[in-house]
Image (cartoon, rainbow, N blue to C red):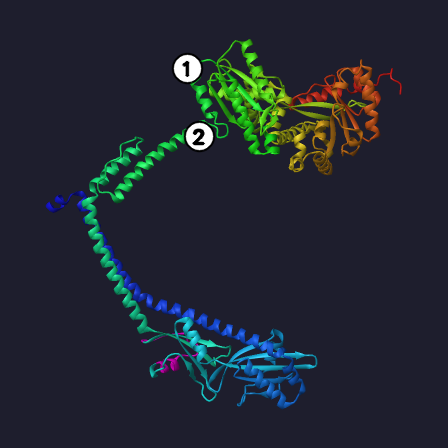
Amino acid sequence: MGLASRLGFRGRLIAAMISLVALVSLVIVALLMVYLFEDEKSRALEQLAIGERLTNEVIDRRTDLELSRLSVVVQDFGFRSAIASRDPATIDSALENHSGRVGADFALLLDSQGEPLASTLQSSFPAITQEQLTSTRRNGFTRSLRAIGGRGYEILIIPIEAPGLRAWLVTGFAMDQTLAEVIARLSGTSVIFRARSDQSIGLSSFAATTSIDDKLEQELAGASDNANFIESAGYFTRIINLGESDPATVQAVLLISRDATLQNYYRRAVEIALLVTAILIFAILLALVIARNMGRPVLQLASYARAIGEGNTPQAPAIRAGGELTQLRNALRDMLSGLREREAQIRYAATHDDVTRLKNRNALMQEAAELFDNRGRATLVGIRLNDLSDINDTLGLEFGDKVLIGIARRLQQELPDARILARTGGGEFLALIPALPPEQDNRRILQLHERIESPLQVDQTPFSLRVTIVTMELPEDAADTDALRRRLNLTFEQAEAHPEAFTRYKPGQDESHLRELKLVTDLHAAILNNGLHMNYQPKLDSQTGELVQVEALVRWIHPELGFISPEEFIFLAEQSGQIHDLTAHILQRVASDARGWHEQGVDAGVAINLSAMDLTWPALTRHIAETFHDWHHGLEQVTLEVTESALMEDPEEAMATLNQLRALGVTLSVDDFGTGYSSLSQLRKLPVQELKIDKSFVLKLDSEPQDQLIVRSTIDMAHGLGLKVVAEGIENLEAWQLLQHWGCNLGQGFYLSRPVAPEDLPETARSLAAREGELSQPNPEYSE
């Protein structure tokens, strides 16, 4: 305990480290020794496996070389001529010469039937079967490994073909000592070739790169024909059966001396043990030196680094030891300098624009927030370059940057008293200038507009720009940065819609924008929660006064804002992407309401208005089919009304959708006819069955001769095209009787019935039925 106290914390730590290093080193040595012994067999097996692949690869490469030589022989004109002569002496001479050229140990020549014509082999040769010849003809050659006379040979059969000539060349290449030495050199193993002799069922060695003692011969002789690996006290052995015969007639035996392997492993183990011992001694000495020389400097550097981490700028400690500690001290000092420099760069980049070097949006908003906090007053001037996007697209981004730099310089010249001048994105610049009286302020802004739009010299070329300028008085027009950003964008939108020299923010615009945002948000909830109301206006047959159809009209009573015009919230639904959800909701409500009043005895079709965006909705047809699939009427009782303007926005897409709807079986109607821009030729091509005359022509039909002419002509034209006609906006009996006289098919309007809730429709239907006599009676003043 006393010794541990005298060592101190650093001493105890170093002692523990030395102990740990010693323990780890001993464990590593022990494990490595065990591993070396265990790894002996796996390394030998891996080397033998590589040797087996090399053996097959060498034999295959030798075969390729032999085949290339033989292909030259069989194409040789002299050789073919000798065979064609059928002279035995000539054939024998040619066969001997050419087999010698390719290095074959023997060669045979067979006729087309496989009978021998000539041979350089003195002994008998195993018969060549017709299957081998057939395989040779199909593949171009046949290779096999055979034992002949106790030695292994590679037998190659190649066809010889020429006009009027067909024969077979059979060559044999000995697997000799040279081949064994090549394989041994490449694989790092000893190689023995063994072959089955004709008189014995056993295998005998005919080529070897190592001496074969009696013990090894006994091990090889005792191995079964299917043995692949033999492990003995002296060798690791792999037996490779060459050829396709079973049992194999030729084998290659690869051997690795176990004694040499163990000696190599023992030598490496000793080397590793010595290395670990040296490292252990060095680690002990190094630990002692470190404990003695680095304790205090390290603590000093730790304190220095801690102060840097806390964001301070401390003085670098004096390190007397030098070397790495001095380098570390210098590195920390350089790091501190770099951190401060990068912080300055980051702060600059966070508040400045890269192109113009002006302040950016962040800096301007910070300055505006400070202005609001201090209850200051200023005029915000916003400038947008209208043509910057076109300049970048046509003249390049580099030219566009030069334009921005030129405008920035002009603004700095024209607004020297600006509290801040910033480029806030794209071609937008904002400046906070001192507040001035209205007249003086107007003159200054007009002068600024004129100066900015005057020709700008860019690359020695005068260049004119169009700009949009807006102004806001702070804090009168905005009391915080959120309101400033929002109202600034609204003012820019107004300025783009009504181009003037400059545009001031007008109070109330922001409230209108917020109202639209609230309506967009609440509309989604109204669709999901059935917050919309459906009304239905009856359509009557002009000849009989009978209720034929009702038009579905959606209404929205907002819980806070009251009645919302359909034109307003449908437009917002289109702008916010909710129009398809709204249409789907209306379809479901109409189908459900129609089933309800049908059960109460009201037999009427329905008419539903579609938005222009609905005609580009791919799922519209499927949704209508699913909604009305079990309806009590045929789909022809469902009328879909589309306006002329909707049809003209994208005629091709609209036509495709209308054709799909027509194929579904619904009735299609052109709504508000006469107010759009469709031509008669376009109308003739549309797959519609009905025209609905706009109410602007019907409201004063009884007193306006021009409206009468237009309506009567439209009815005649529609009937001529085979279309039914519906008139809306009927306000009195005279208009109804005129339409009745001209043959208008259906009519609707306040004179006939106002829109009613779905639960009130049965009662309205009964009231209209009571008026059928009145409504079907024509005016006797109108002659046929």
Q: Choose mark 2 or mark 1, whichever is in front.
A: 2
49 displayed left or right of 167: left
Image quadrant assignment for residue 525: top right
Q: Residue furthest right?
A: 783
Is residue 1 rendered magenta in the image?
A: no
- Per the image, label 2 sits on a secondary structure element best described as helix
Between the residue at mark 2 and the residue at mark 1, the CA separation in whole angstroms equals: 26 Å
Q: Residue at x 56, y 23 (%)?
A: 384
718 displayed left or right of 282: right
Q: Residue at x 48, y 25 (%)?
A: 358
List x then y, in percent, for residue 496. 61, 22
Which residue is at the front of the view, 341 or 619?
341
- In the rendered image, which residue does mark 2 sit on? 349
Q: Is residue 764 visible?
A: yes
Going from N to C along the chain, the mark reached first, 2 or 1, is 2
- In the rendered image, which residue does mark 1 sit on? 374
Which residue is at the front of the view, 147 or 275?
275
Q: Which label belongs to residue 336?
A: none
- Per the image, label 1 sits on a secondary structure element best described as loop
Q: Callout 1 environment at 10 Å: few (<14), some (14 to 19), or many (20+)?
A: few
Identity, as a three-letter code, of the amino acid under mark 1: Asn
Extent of the magenta region: 216-233
List x then y, in percent, for residue 337. 34, 34
25 displayed left or right of 167: left
Identity, as a three-letter code, of the amino acid under mark 2: Ala
List x then y, in percent, for residue 580. 62, 32
